[in-house]
Image (cartoon, rainbow, N blue to C red):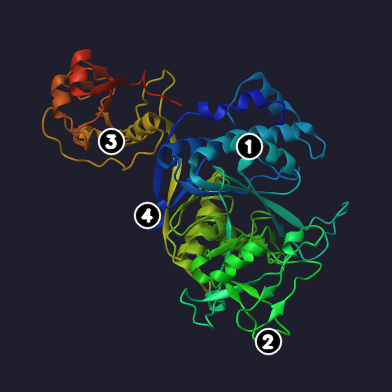
Amino acid sequence: MPTLDWIGKAAVVNHHRKVPYRLLRCDRELSAGDADAGNLLVQGDNLLALKALLPYYAGKVKCIYIDPPYNTGNENWVYNDNVNSPEIRQWIAATVGKEGEDLSRHDKWLCMMYPRLALLRDFLTQDGVILVSLDETELAHLRMILDEIFGKANFIGSFVWNTRNTDNRVKTYLSPDHEYIIAYGRSRGVSILGRRIDRSDFKNPDNDPRGPYVTDPLTGKATAAERPNLHAYNMEQPGTGNVWKPDPAKGWITDEAGYKALLADNRIWWPPNPATGKPRKKRFLSDTQERMPASSFWTEFRALSGAKEVGDIVGERVFAFPKPLSVVQKVIDHCAPRDCIVLDSFAGTGTTAHAVLAQNNADGGSRRFITVEMDEGICRDVTAQRIRKAIDGYGETPGLGGGFRFCTLGAALFDDAGNIASEVRFGDLAAHVFFTETGSPIPKRPRRLPHPGPLPKGEGEYSPLLGVHQGRAIYLLFNGVLGDKRPAGGNVLTHAIAEALPPHPDGEGPRVVYGEACRLGAKSLEQYGITFRQIPFELKVD
């Protein structure tokens, strides 16, 4: 398969694996509404934020929608990949001009996008979908790196939406009146559903026991020369003598054997007036999917202004071209089932979060959003303000309800020496341990639970049992007293600790215990059914 190369690619292809895990800190004062609604707004570089979110949401997101910088040359965007290789220094040092053929600008955009897209892939469910908005500036480049990251076979298609209803008055070769939304699935066979069927169209005039139906044409699209078997018979209505010959230019949609099968199954509707009507095929409501495949061409948005929508909500024009709410809401309607997580790592003015709330209000859904915005001022004063007003209502617009937690990025999980950072608490480390051991998010955030026996008080009141994955029970010995290697300190696996551990929830099975040290020999570990992993040396950072 052809691949795309650019200055800096070698340094960024695996860069997402080296990004440090960071802690997330929630700010109650900047949060709004129901804090337990499951929605997050994270302020920080989206590369760092995505890595921080990964232990909790890997494989759990059904729909990702992002609207990254289009790289037209008229934008000011800065994303720090924190890469110090000579290649990256080369493209950072290059002049990012506005000229359309300035390759350094395209190199920089690709270096910014690649590791973020690679991380986003890990968030998707197996039937999940990612959608990326852009224009033609980076369209070809984006398709090639998405083919590389998600797989060419997982390309679903492109949506084209009409962005304006007047000609572009700027001097250009063409009037650019459309943009794209590119869609890829996490795996093959992922589809996007469009409009819902209208149940009122389905009738049952002949009281068919299979229920209401609509009718579809039986006329085909092939000439006799092209498909002679579709012209080789007439359709005869039983008991009436009514006969219909095939259209010489089109024929039927099926051969004679298929026709006889439909006839035997009473799936042919006969017209009341044979002189004016033709036989049609019954399609029953019970056999019809709830929604039709989505159309790839959207014309209804050309007169809408996302900038005006944001201005009406927050009182100022912040971005020149934010997406209209209805465009993103249509993406949510098509791609995000009613009970799922929607992720947007280029939050901007918060359109995706607003669209999730609006679609929940429209169809009674319980979707949750995770959005990330890098710019601190925009995140606090625009993104958070817009979502808050969408929840509470503004002007004559009623509130949509819900809530969100406002989070910022804390310290890295590991310090420069490779040890657990002093800020880390049990819940933070537990989520990371479970994720890196199993590849799945921790099933439940640890809660304080009293434990009898030799486990110490304080942080040791958390249950050391984190959860079970594919039969393995995962445990963490970590009481917050970093560097405490005393056998009674709670971080060290001893006979007393091993006997005090909560039993395997399934009654029996392998157990994996993380701790600072182990005082048990190989035979004892085997007797307890324990595999021990030492922190921090055996704690994976990828």
Q: Which residue is mark 1?
A: 113
Q: Residues within 10 Å of mark 4 (few under 14, many from 20)?
A: some
The tag on residue 35 is 4
Q: Secondary structure at mark 2?
A: loop
Residue at the spot 66% in from the left edge and 27% down from the top edge: 9
Residue 87 or residue 138, whichever sits in front: 138
Q: Secondary structure at mark 4?
A: loop
In this view, the mark in front (4 or 3):
3
Q: Which residue is mark 2?
A: 273
In screen coordinates, is 330 left or right of 400?
Answer: right
Mark 2 or 4, nearer chain start: 4
Instruction: Give the CA distance from mark 3 to mark 1.
Output: 34 Å
Rendering quarter of residue 540 = top left
Instruction: Give the CA distance from mark 4 to mark 1.
Output: 31 Å
Q: Residues within 10 Å of mark 2 (few under 14, many from 20)?
A: few
Residue 78 visible (yes or no)? no
The amino acid beneath tag 3 is Leu
Place of residue 34 in the rendered image (x, y in percent of width and height, measured from the top left): 37, 58
Residue 310 or residue 362, whichever sits in front: 362
In this view, the mark in front (2 or 3):
2
Instruction: Give the CA distance from mark 2 to mark 1.
Output: 62 Å
CB within 8 Å, label 4 to label 1:
no
Place of residue 519 in the rendered image (x, y in percent of width and height, measured from the top left): 20, 15
Mark 2 or 1, nearer chain start: 1
Residue 308 or residue 29, whichever sits in front: 308
The amino acid beneath tag 2 is Asn
Mark 3 or 1, nearer chain start: 1
Instruction: Give the CA distance from mark 2 to mark 3.
Output: 71 Å
Instruction: Give the CA distance from mark 2 to mark 4.
Output: 64 Å
